[in-house]
Amino acid sequence: MHYILCVFSLLVSVDISIGVPAGIKDDLKISKLKYDEDMDILRTEIKLLQDKVTELKSTTERLDTRLMSGDSDGADSTGHVLHKRATFRRRRRRPEIAFQASLTTESQTYKLYEPITFNHVLTNIGHAYNKNTGIFTVPLAGTYTFNTNIVAEKGNYVEVSIKVNDDVTVSAISDHRVSPGRQYFDIWDQGNAVAILELQRGDKVSVSIQWPQGSHDIHGVGKSSFSGYLIRSHEPRH
């Protein structure tokens, strides 16, 4: 800037000493005035920027001080945001699949190896259980748990199993046969079985009578049931 001013001064001096025409003198004066105006504007803008930088530094220092001192409001707010993020990630990581169904008829006859059709659906998150077939079709590969409660009708003895495809996993027994005195057992004997299984997409899980041979009556009215849910998916997130 000082260099430019010196040039203008020199030109004005030369112009006076050598007799530069008046028109050129006027142009030089106008250019110098315009230059001075532009420089004033630049100085003002630089000053505003410097003030803004100073303000930002001050704000940053205040925030650093609050963080270092463990500001409770800031900590609570940060903790709330982190909790919401963690909850969202858990929901993405753990899809919900669950069902529960019971047999509502008073007595239902089933053949050996025939899936028991628990017809009353209480819960069917994921729509993987079919009440018409009694089969749960695995929608996602993962670890699942299944539970069945079974009650044989009077005069019947049954052993039922939770099956994956055609393979038996765990079994339960319900004995409601006639006693030696020709009287039915007074207590409803409810068999129970629980299975924790690693399954692949498309596997079919059901409950069926495994023993003895022939047809047998299962007591319903909500006393015989089948349920299950996904513990953890083994499939990658998308």
Image: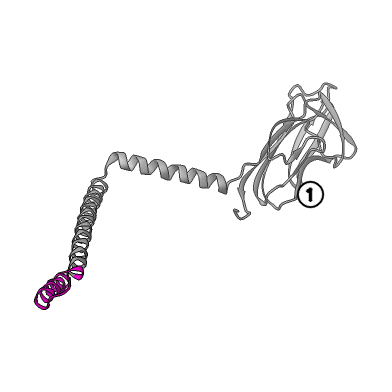
Residue sitting at x 82%, y 28%: 177
User: Is residue 165 left or right of 197 when viewed as pictured?
Assistant: right
Residue 154 at least partly seen: no
Q: Which of 158/35 is in front?
A: 35
Q: What range of the chain is rendered magenta?
A: 1-24
Residue sitting at x 40%, y 40%: 80
Q: Is residue 3 shown in magenta?
A: yes
Residue 93 at least partly seen: yes
Q: Is residue 100 shown in magenta?
A: no
Sort mark 1 into few (<14), some (14-19) or many (20+) by Cα contacts within 10 Å: few
Which x, y percent locates residue 166? 81, 49
Which x, y percent locates residue 143? 64, 49
Which x, y percent locates residue 137? 75, 45
Quarter assignment of residue 206: top right
Can you identify the residue that label 1 sits on? 165
Above or below residue 148? Residue 86 is below
Above or below residue 21? Residue 226 is above
Residue sitting at x 17%, y 72%: 21
Above or below residue 169? Residue 6 is below
> Which quadrant is home to the N terminus?
bottom left
Q: Which of 152/88 is in front?
A: 88
Magenta stretch, main secondary structure, is helix
Number of marks: 1
Tag 1's secondary structure? loop
Identified by mark 1, the residue type is: Asn
User: Is residue 47 left or right of 171 when viewed as pictured?
Assistant: left
Above or below residue 16? Residue 219 is above
Q: Which of 209/21 is in front?
A: 21
